[in-house]
Image: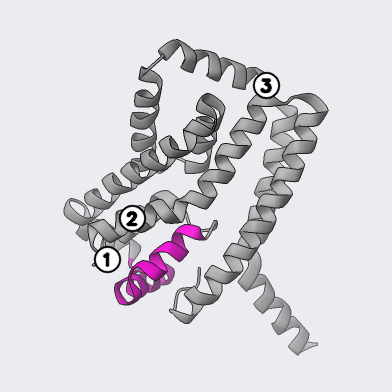
């Protein structure tokens, strides 16, 4: 029994982020069905259409500001899919990368000492910083690919590393691309279907997203563990 309990504890400790992600996905599905999503989507699309050419510019500014204040990036990317369709993909990636750059610069050149005192008290943050310092872009892109690593907070953490700015920007854009494609797809689907079809499409999309996230997370976590990061 003790061996079984220890094994169960290791499994829980290793995979609890995936369980949390599954619960979040379930809550999103429930909220999507319970809330008047179609009405919100129509209102958002209508408001963006009224802005004309200024729509993408305003979206860019709001995304950058949202990233700096740690707003949830998936929701902001989904909004691009709703408002701009697949044209929202490059817009979301560019906006997210610009927001990540702002957070990075704030961390590296303005709040470095304060952030380092706070973040380095956490073993995971310290290990992640050391891994990026030693391995560079390889660990950076894995951290970006892992769906359990908060995008906004990671930007500030990476500002404390010694990684070059150009490397940071390039691999940030590459690392967030897969997740952005999923978010844009969800936004487009939400804007084009309704009722029972909306629910079925959403569930299938969530299952596919969870499967992809599981594979990416397991691969990323395996490598990160080798680098000493328990992410």
Q: Is residue 97 left or right of residue 86?
A: left
The label shown at residue 170 is 2
Q: Which residue occupies the foreground of this view, 121 or 13? A: 13
> According to the image, label 3 marks what residue?
38
Residue stretch in magenta: 120-145
Q: Is residue 137 magenta?
A: yes
Give SS at disc 1.
loop
Measured along the vertical axis of the image, is residue 76 above or below residue 6? above
> Which residue appears at 51% of the width and 45% of the height?
180
Query: Mark 3 Cα within 10 Å, few/some/many (few <14, many 20+)?
Result: some
Q: CA distance from mark 3 to mark 2?
A: 36 Å
Q: CA distance from mark 2 to mark 1?
A: 16 Å
Question: Looking at the picture, how far across and down is residue 136, in whole percent?
Answer: 33, 70
Give SS at disc 2.
helix
Please report whichever mark, 3 or 1, sits nearer to the chain's N-terminal start: 3
Q: CA distance from mark 3 to mark 1?
A: 43 Å
Name the colour scheme: one colour
């Amino acid at each position: 029994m003790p061996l079984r309990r220890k094994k169960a504890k290791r499994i829980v400790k290793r995979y609890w982020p995936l369980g949390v992600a599954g619960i979040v996905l379930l809550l999103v599905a429930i909220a999507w069905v319970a809330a008047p999503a179609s009405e919100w989507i129509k209102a958002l699309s209508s408001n963006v259409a009224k802005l004309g050419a200024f729509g993408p510019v305003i979206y860019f500014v709001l995304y950058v500001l949202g990233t700096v204040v740690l707003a949830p990036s998936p929701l902001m990317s989904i909004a691009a899919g709703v408002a701009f369709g697949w044209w929202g993909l490059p817009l979301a990636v560019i906006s997210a990368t610009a927001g990540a750059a702002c957070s990075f610069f704030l961390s590296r050149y303005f709040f470095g000492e304060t952030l380092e005192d706070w973040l380095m008290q956490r073993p995971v943050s310290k290990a992640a910083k050391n891994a990026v310092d030693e391995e560079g872009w390889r660990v950076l892109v894995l951290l970006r690919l892992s769906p359990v690593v908060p995008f906004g907070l990671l930007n500030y953490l990476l500002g404390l590393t010694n990684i070059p700015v150009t490397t940071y920007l390039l691999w940030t854009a590459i690392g967030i691309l897969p997740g952005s494609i999923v978010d844009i797809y969800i936004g487009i689907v939400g804007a084009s279907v309704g009722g029972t079809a909306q629910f079925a499409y959403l569930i299938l999309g969530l299952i596919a997203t969870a499967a992809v996230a599981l594979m990416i997370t397991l691969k990323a976590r395996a490598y990160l563990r080798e680098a000493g990061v328990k992410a």
